[in-house]
Amino acid sequence: MECLQLGRGKRLGLLDSLDLGGQQVVREYQYAAVQKTGATPRNLCTLSFTTLNPAFRFSEHDAGNTGTIFFMSGAAEFDLLVPEGVQTTYVSLDQEDFLTAARVLNPVEWGDVPAGVKPLQSEQRALFDSSVAALFKAAREQGDTFDPGVMRQLLFQAMVRIATQAQKDAGAAPPALRVRALRICKGARACAEDRLETEDLPTIVELCATLGVSERTLQYAFRTHLNMSPLAYLRLLRLNRVRATLRRSSRAETTVTSAAMLHGFLHLGRFSRDYNRVFGELPSTTLAS
């Protein structure tokens, strides 16, 4: 998974996680907006929910309503936009074990594996929230006596119950325009990533030509999926790349100037101001840490 910082702030978020052995429980609060992209392992599926926020995107889906939870299958690609102030909670499970149990309880709904990211409409979201909260509380209070095996079984049963009592494909299908916006944004990012490898940056004209869309369509896609312009997004992408370079390098290996110019920043004064505004520190501070 790759996490791209889109919002301003030195602190990206606060993350709590539990490893129960074959199950991962994560609860994360975002101090700055981020985009997370990647794919799930083939043998793991996840159940999750999020704070309601109109800017939230889980691939082509929005946050839904107070009863929406998300199922994501193994080997699924995702493009997750989490705005500032949003909390996401998710549990990863062994997919084969989960589907075996789910098919026993609800063979009609779970006979086939829902591929990719699917919203579910559930009256059990409160159980999801309380189960995760109880796990973190038990881990804090029990310390070394905390038994992951017992908690793993309790959590597994709760997640199967939640999923099998839910209805798949809740509500209307995502609007076709939102699905197209996701596709265009992914294509634009892939094009930009390819060009960054050769130290050559694509123009808006080149992006439109590569994707076969007009500038208006490109602008609309980025506003719909990421709530920003293509130019703003591509600049943030390059700023994040510089930050990653500075974090993994020492002063003996690189300089701020060389890292900035490598990613297309020729006006170093403006670059330094933009970097400080987004990440809350000067690039020289990142390199020194």
Image (tube, rainbow, N blue to C red):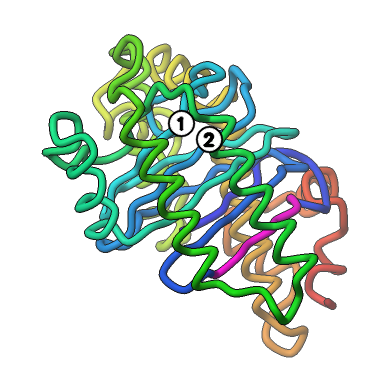
Name which residue lies at 83% across and 77% down: 289
Q: Earlier in the sequence, mark 2 or mark 1?
A: 2
List the single residue furthest toward the bottom: 252
Q: Is residue 14 magenta?
A: yes
Q: Is residue 102 above or below residue 23?
A: above
Q: Is residue 14 above or below residue 149?
A: above
Q: Position of residue 263 (x, y in %)?
A: 58, 58
- Give left or right: position of 147 versus 62: right
Label 2 close to label 1 by CB (< 8 Å): yes
Name which residue lies at 31% across and 34% down: 164
Name which residue lies at 43% across and 45% down: 159
Q: Position of residue 239 (x, y in %)?
A: 65, 52
Q: Is residue 122 above or below residue 90?
A: above
Q: Helix, strand, or loop for circle 1?
A: strand
Q: Helix, strand, or loop for circle 2?
A: strand
Per the model, the C-alpha gap separating discs 2 and 1 is 5 Å
Q: Is residue 219 above or below residue 264?
A: above
Name which residue lies at 68% across and 47% down: 133
Residue 210 or residue 111, whichever sits in front: 111
What are the residue bounds of the magenta stretch?
13-19
Residue 16 or residue 237, whichever sits in front: 16
Graded by Cα atoms within 10 Å as few (under 14), some (14 to 19) or many (20 or more), the crowding at tag 2 reads many
Question: Residue 148: which numbered mark, if any?
Answer: none
Q: Indicate the quadrant where residue 107 lies.
A: top left
Question: Which residue is denoted by mark 1 in the rendering?
Answer: 69
Question: Which residue is denoted by mark 2 in the rendering?
Answer: 49
Q: Indicate the quadrant where residue 286 lies.
A: bottom right
Residue 15 or residue 131, whichever sits in front: 131
